[in-house]
Image (cartoon, rainbow, N blue to C red):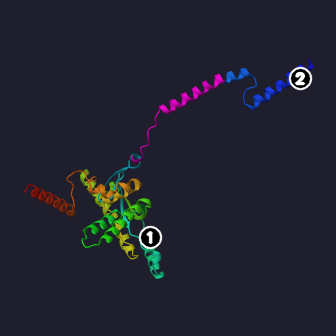
Amino acid sequence: MRDLLIMGAFALALWVFVRIILKEPILPWMAKEDQDETPLMMKKRTSKTEKQNDVEEPEPEIFKNMFSDIKGISDHMIRYKNNRFVLISEVEPVNYFLLSQDEQEAIDSSFERWLATLDYNVQWYLQNRYVDLSEPIEEMRKNMIGQDDLPPNAIQYGKDLIDDLVQWQSIAPRYETKRYLVFVYQVDAKQITAEDKEELEEKIVEKAFAELYRRFNSAKSALRKANINMHLLTSEGIVEVLYYAFNRRKAIKNKFKDIRMKEMLSLYVTADQDSRRIEMVKEMIDSETFRKEEKAG
């Protein structure tokens, strides 16, 4: 009898040890209850997540909220709904560290004198753009094809050079920094007298452009002494700056110049064109007409 009790105690201890090692309940009937409860808990949890996934959250309208207070871009300015106008000018850089000490001091003094005269808000904006070599590469290709007296080795060398440039541009893109000076001015419409709304709008735009252009000329004349050149951005130039700001990756393939050439910036198909484009279209029409006449004759 004593041996049976010892063997039973040993078997019980072995059972407890094995169940603990296997990470299972010591009592067998407890496992069934746990197995019955876990699916219910999982069903409840999955049902909650399914309900949460069924409700689609609306995507934030980033661009709509960002430009909600902008009225438009016209007259070389960005106009806001509260009659605040923004004029942007591009600033050409100067090789400061390649100049002598006297030249550097002259630039510093001219820049400091201009800053001392400011009694209004001026902002600097820097933009990194992808260096596009497509135009120089295309010009090289046209020049190479147009030469009739080149030896075969020179033509092959030119083709290899163009291919290497195209491959280098796709593998290792380069970026350049564009520098802009931003002038901001807000017009108080209460100080302007007009007979109707149309006249009021004209006077608001005229006053804003006159003040901003005066500030631009003041900065241009002051920075010219520091060998820093500036030029005013037109409405199309402002659109180009915004295009590169919000399409940093897309602008590599969808270039802004292609959008302009395809007249995607025009409100109407019959938009005004420059004389160079008109002459090019006329030459294409004349060449096509001449080709059809030769084919018919």
Using the rendered view, name the quadrant where residue 272 is placed. bottom left
Question: Picture coordinates of residue 276 (x, y %)?
Answer: 21, 64
Q: Nearer the viewer, mark 1 or mark 2?
A: 2
Circle 2 Cα neighbour tier, 10 Å, few/some/many (<14 / 14–19 / ≥20)? few
Q: Residue at x 89, y 23 (%)?
A: 6
Q: Main secondary structure of the magenta part?
A: helix
Q: Quadrant of the N terminus?
A: top right
Residues in magenta, as a range: 35-63
Give the residue type that dot 2 points to. Answer: Ile
* Label of residue 94 in the image: none
Q: Which residue is mark 1?
A: 115
Q: Earlier in the sequence, mark 1 or mark 2?
A: 2
Identify which residue, 97 or 209, lies in the foreground: 97
* Label of residue 6 in the image: 2
82 over 17 or under it: above or below: below
Instruction: Tell me whether the residue at label 1 lies in contact with that at label 2, contact meaning CB atoms closer than 8 angstroms.
Output: no
- Spatial CA distance of label 1 from label 2 is 99 Å
Q: Residue at x 54, y 31 (%)?
A: 49
